[in-house]
């Protein structure tokens, strides 16, 4: 039984249980939208450049808002912040549903809505992450963090698979509608939370400095620390050069007839591989050369996507994506250990 995830935080903390369940639902809905947006862009334009533009629409808001968003979460009542962001996310998903129902074919509208969703995630993620240490006692924190990781894996497995089936039956508008509805659980969980005011004693001199200054100091520290800089650069390099999500619809259309059910299996395979290694990550504690091991796992990630790039067999395509997901989970775990 010691090999299984400790569910004590779910059993003993109603606030954490509601937040975890709501986050699971909204993350799965978000994964369905992440499936639908590239496919709609591809269907409307048949251009990999236009589809790849969605990645830019995700990256720019994250780059500009992630650091100030994290600082904002440290300075305001996090419950109120999450309420505002969750309502805004419902509206953004509702707009995606509305444009799909209206049959609009504007790639720039998709870019704008994708950028809005990305900006909201950049504010929501750090605020939600910092809630966990305040909802569970210190001795349950590790288990709570592990349970939080399960949300990501389950959403990656269930979201695209369900989206593929739903798209085949009802079209992309069904994915956007489910995403908007999925925020209901998250909204209810946040409403039931107690007030989460910022800490009143952040440390000497801390309150006199801007959030941007503190964020830049953190980046400067990482840059000066060669181990941390190498760790983040290795991971960023692997995902930047070997995560061709924008090509998934085109490759599916070229090799497998454009069946949305098969397209959904692409991301699901990555999630399944990641879930397997998340369960079987125990042996990692016996390795001491974490830097070398991380280089091996990011190399395996890249090699798996190289196989995916040339494979014309569905079974090999899914296997390669599964291996990539398995390598990614190891990389995330090792990176956390190094940090």
Image: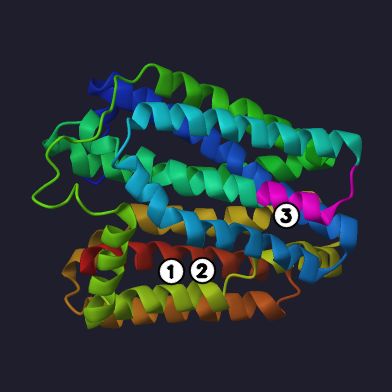
- Label 2, residues with CA under 10 Å away: few <14, some 14-19, many ≥20: many
Evaluate if marks 2 and 3 touch, with contact meaning CB atoms under 8 Å apart: no
Residue 276: x percent and y percent? Answer: 42, 55
Q: Does the magenta stretch include residue 253?
A: no
Q: Count the labels in the image.
A: 3
Who is closer to the viewer here, 111 or 15?
A: 111
Residue 38: x percent and y percent? Answer: 74, 56
* Residue that label 3 marks: 111
Find numbered disc 3 in the image and state the secondary structure of the residue it sits on: helix
Evaluate if marks 2 and 1 touch, with contact meaning CB atoms under 8 Å apart: yes
Quarter residue 307 falls in: bottom right
Q: What stretch is highlighted in magenta?
A: 104-114
Find numbered disc 1 in the image and state the secondary structure of the residue it sits on: helix
* Residue that label 1 marks: 327
* Residue that label 2 marks: 324
Measure the C-alpha gap from mark 2 to mark 1: 5 Å
Q: Is residue 111 magenta?
A: yes
Q: Which residue is pictured at 61% across the width and 81% down the height?
A: 306
Q: Which residue is pictured at 29% across the width and 42% down the height?
A: 74
Quarter residue 334 falls in: bottom left
Who is closer to the viewer here, 338 or 194?
A: 194
Q: Residue furthest top?
A: 192
Q: Which residue is pictured at 56% across the width and 28% down the height?
A: 87
Q: Mark 3 or mark 1: name the one nearer the start of the chain.
A: 3
Observer able to see residue 314: no
Measure the C-alpha gap from mark 2 to mark 3: 28 Å
């Amino acid at each position: 039984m010691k090999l299984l995830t400790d569910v004590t935080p779910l059993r003993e903390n109603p606030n954490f249980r509601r937040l975890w369940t709501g986050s699971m639902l909204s993350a799965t809905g978000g994964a369905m939208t992440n499936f639908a947006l590239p496919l709609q862009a591809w269907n409307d334009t048949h251009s990999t450049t236009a589809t790849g533009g969605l990645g830019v629409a995700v990256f720019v808001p994250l780059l500009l808002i992630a650091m100030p968003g994290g600082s904002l979460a440290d300075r305001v009542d996090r419950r109120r912040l999450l309420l505002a962001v969750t309502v805004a996310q419902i509206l953004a998903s509702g707009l995606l549903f509305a444009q799909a129902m209206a049959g609009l074919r504007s790639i720039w509208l998709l870019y704008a809505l994708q950028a809005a969703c990305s900006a909201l995630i950049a504010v929501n993620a750090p605020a939600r992450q910092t809630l966990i240490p305040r909802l569970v006692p210190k001795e349950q924190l590790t288990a709570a963090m592990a349970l939080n990781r399960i949300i990501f894996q389950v959403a990656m497995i269930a979201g695209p698979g369900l989206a593929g089936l739903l798209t085949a039956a009802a079209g992309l508008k069904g994915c956007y509608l489910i995403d908007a509805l999925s925020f209901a659980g998250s909204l209810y969980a946040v409403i039931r939370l107690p007030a989460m005011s910022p800490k009143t004693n952040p440390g000497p001199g801390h309150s006199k400095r801007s959030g941007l200054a503190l964020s830049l100091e953190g980046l400067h520290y990482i840059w000066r620390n060669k181990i941390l800089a190498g760790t983040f650069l290795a991971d960023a390099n692997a995902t930047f050069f070997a995560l061709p999500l924008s090509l998934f619809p085109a490759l599916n259309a070229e090799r497998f007839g454009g069946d949305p059910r098969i397209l959904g299996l692409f991301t699901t395979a990555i999630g399944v591989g990641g879930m397997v290694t998340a369960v079987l990550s125990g042996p990692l504690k016996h390795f001491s050369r974490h830097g070398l091991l991380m280089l091996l796992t990011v190399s395996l990630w890249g090699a798996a996507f190289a196989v995916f790039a040339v494979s014309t067999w569905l079974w090999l395509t899914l296997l390669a994506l599964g291996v990539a997901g398995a390598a990614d989970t190891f990389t995330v775990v090792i990176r956390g250990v190094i940090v």
